[in-house]
Image (spheres, rainbow, N blue to C red):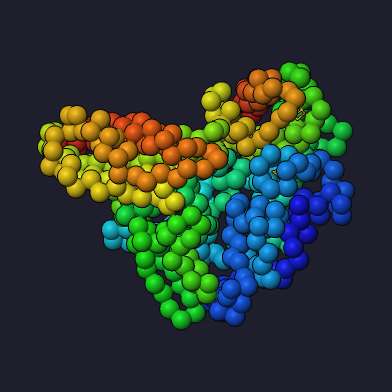
Amino acid sequence: MLLCDFLRHELHAFAVHVGCEHGVCGACTILIEGRAVRSCTQYAAQADGADIVTAEGLAPPGTLNEVQRAFMKHHALQCGFCTPGILCSVAHFLRQTPEPDERRVREMLSGHICRCTGYTSIVTAILEAAAMMRKGS
Amino acid sequence: MKPVAFDYYRPQTLSEALELLADKGDEAVILAGGMTLGPMLNLRIVRPRAVIDISRIEALQTISVTGSVVVTGAGLTQSEALSSEIIAREVPLLAMALPWVGHFQTRNRGTLGGSVAHADPSAEIPLALVACGGTVVLQSRWGQRRIGARQFFVGALVTQRRPDEMIMALEWPRSAPDAGHAFSEIAQRHGDFAIAAAACTVRLAKPDRVEQLVVGIGGVEDRPVAIDVSSFLGQAPGEMAAKLSEYAAASVSPMDDRSASAAYRTALTKVLVERAVNSALSIARLQRGRLQ
Ligand code: FES
Ligand code: FES
């Protein structure tokens, strides 16, 4: 069983979206041991014992993290299909690259396909969230 | 889509993995990061009876420097390689190729060994290994074979690996401190497979004499190739990039397929070789200046 199917159908982590099912679109991106990876090109058995965070777990229930707030403010989502995957990627990316420039953000985003928002607002939101997080810490 | 049903094995040690491989051979596929095999399984392009997951074998995830080579375990992820200081210092060509490999999210899981084993003609890691003159270390229950990268890749997705062997490590010759390296590529979108890519390494003996020169080309033929550039050794680097790019474009036998025509690949070879050679030369000049 694919890891994404296990997370959705067995654990009901519905923020794990499934688009292409072969590693291309990024919708199914989650954090395994803190690293952003596809969950459609892995099997549930492979993740045995691993620490997994889906978009549901990026902020305490009922709250939004800095990145999620910036996405809301800048209209960085429309249908929201691509969003949970992007949020997981951003969590890892900003930990590794706390002061990204636009080029690096766009390079990281090349691993996600968004069919409605048009990327510009997503880039703006990520850059602003990064600045806010730097101020906060 | 979903893969066909298969038996899943997750050996903890190398010897367990080799035992399984000896036993299952043809019916088994080796799964490391799954960035290539995963899609192929899901699309049912491969329908194995057994999948041997080597991603938890720690002995395959090391980087070490021994004498004149850097040895990377087959299971080392592309992102670990990209953040390694050893690789940045000792194998700069690989460090330059890695940002072109897939995306941030796929490099977090994709491995060096997996890319080499899959042998896509346009993949960057095989090209870097060929250009460096590196070696593939193959291991089976019966012994070890070491094959030069330039012989290892036979054709598109075809290598010298036998079904009972697995890639254990890759050996990358350490770069000379005064060498200049460069990697250039054209793809449809960043992170897609290259339509064409070029790698270059150059060393200057004196400011006006080329001492060592390598030009590698990926995505153009059915496997990554190193062009025979011996006639350029000992020459002055002045007009070299332009001449070499003509020469490289004339020496390749390009593929012709849906992603690009043969004529376009030849044109790209010329442009990319010129870019790579120019930028490797300027780095080599800087390095020479710095070391003197
Ligand atoms: S569903 Fe996993 S990358 Fe598209
Ligand atoms: S918001 Fe609709 S796909 Fe990105």
- Res. A130 visible in picture: yes
- Res. B89 visible in picture: no
* Residue B156 spot, x, y in % from top left: 48, 55
Q: Looking at the picture, does residue B13 appear above or below residue A126?
A: below
So how many labels did they put on this image?
A: 0
Left or right placement of residue B96 versus residue A4 in this view: left
* Residue A128 spot, x, y in % from top left: 65, 21
Residue at 18%, 41% in the rendered image: B232
Left or right placement of residue B58 versus residue A89 in this view: left
* Residue A42 spot, x, y in % from top left: 69, 55
Residue at 61%, 42% in the rendered image: B105
- State the image quarter where residue B278 is shown: top left
Query: Looking at the image, which is closer to me, B96 or B226?
Result: B226
Residue at 41%, 48% in the rendered image: B221
- State the image quarter where residue B268 is shown: top left
- State the image quarter where residue B42 is shown: bottom right
Ligand 1 position by quadrant: top right
Left or right placement of residue B256 versus residue A124 in this view: left
* Residue B263 spot, x, y in % from top left: 41, 35
Quadrant of the drawing holding the C terminus of chain B? top left
Residue at 69%, 40% in the rendered image: A26
Q: Looking at the picture, does residue A40 appear above or below residue B49?
A: above
